[in-house]
Image (cartoon, grey):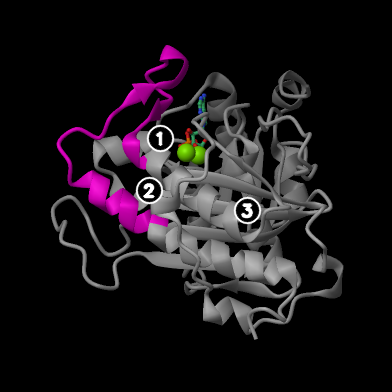
Amino acid sequence: MANSSPLVLRLLAASASVSRHAGSIIRNISTKKDVGVVLKGGRADDPQTEADRQAQRCIISSLKHQFPTVTIIGEEDIDGGCDETLLHTGLDEEVLKCSLPEGLHSDGSDVVVWVDPLDGTSEFTAGFWDNVTVLIGIAVKGEAACGVIHQPFFGMSPDNPTPSSSAGRTCWGITGVGSFGYTYTAPSNPARRSIASTRTHSTGHVKDTIEALKPTEQVNVGGAGCKVLMLLEGRADVYAFASPGTSKWDTCAGQAMLEAVGGHLTDIAGNKYRYTADVTLKNTRGVLASLNADHKELVDLVPDSVKQALSK
Ligand code: AMP
Ligand code: MG
Ligand code: MG
């Protein structure tokens, strides 16, 4: 069945499978005393660790080996050579059971894979393990189409660090099909507006926007993947980040998974981001994501001054 499946479905099945392998690499490195922190651009709020580097090598080598014609873009600026020792070529059987919508059939030439090998690196180094995810987004013709969000430490914490044989959780989705691997629970208070935002990258615009969105609750957690999962599970209603800080590898997977269940991930003016290979890497116009909310109403609440400031 695997070989006769459409390319994008096989690519998603390989991505889900290799995300688990990357997760086990990340767990192994978390047990080391020295996780090899490098400050990217010398900035303390943009760290990279050996876990980011090895997880990216594993994911990109493995996907390139199986899909040599597909463009793959990873967050980390490291030697891109194929590392045979990290190759993983499994395919997720659950993914392969899906029927891929006609519009996502492709020969691979218009497919771009966006890889964030470890989203929430600051949180990884600070022991906020539940904020850490591996993100693999698949764009077809520039549109976020499929996504994988893997949580390497699901069910674990620094206080309870021993991984069971089933450590980690892999959630994935396909636009037009659905998102899987987690359970959505509706809030007991339908009037709740719980807003998830950054733990470490707040700014005046970020704060002003959250206030304008009239939250009934606010949660500050690290990582774009973790915040999208909060929406998917019904633990929060809105992800708001009026800052140019995130990049396409942070949002492609989550955008696809939210759209797959009727949600939205846009810039703060309500425009969808696109994911062609030549696109600007940064999400310069910020992030506004929601599920089971009136997204247009949220866009309208964002202050014009903030929209103006992030309009480039
Ligand atoms: P956060 O919600 O702050 O945890 O950020 C989500 C993702 O965007 C993470 O991968 C961060 O590293 C990245 N990010 C957000 N803001 C910045 C920033 N100002 N500089 C570098 N990376 C950022
Ligand atoms: Mg990230
Ligand atoms: Mg990262």
Instruction: Please report the bounds of the magenta region as a residue range.
Output: 22-51
Residue at the location (68% across, 55% down)? 138
Badge 2 is on which residue? 131
**Crowd around label 3: few <14 · some 14–19 · many ≥20 (10 Å):** many
* Position of the N terminus by quadrant: bottom right
Q: Quadrant of residue 118?
A: top left
Labels 2 and 1: the sequence-earlier one: 2
Residue at the location (30% across, 27% down)? 37
Residue 137: numbered disc: 3
Measured in 3D between alpha carbons, the distance from the residue under mark 2 to the one under mark 3, in whole angstroms, is 18 Å
Could you tell me the amino acid type at mark 2?
A: Asn
Residue 199: numbered disc: 1
Secondary structure type for disc 2: helix
Q: Are marks 2 and 3 in contact (CB under 8 Å)?
A: no
The answer as to whether callout 2 falls within 8 Å of ligand 1 is yes
Could you tell me the amino acid type at mark 1?
A: Arg
Measured in 3D between alpha carbons, the distance from the residue under mark 2 to the one under mark 1, in whole angstroms, is 10 Å
| Above or below: residue 288 compared with residue 42 | below
Can see residue 245?
yes
Image coords of residue 285 (percent x, y)? 71, 30
* Position of the C terminus by quadrant: top right
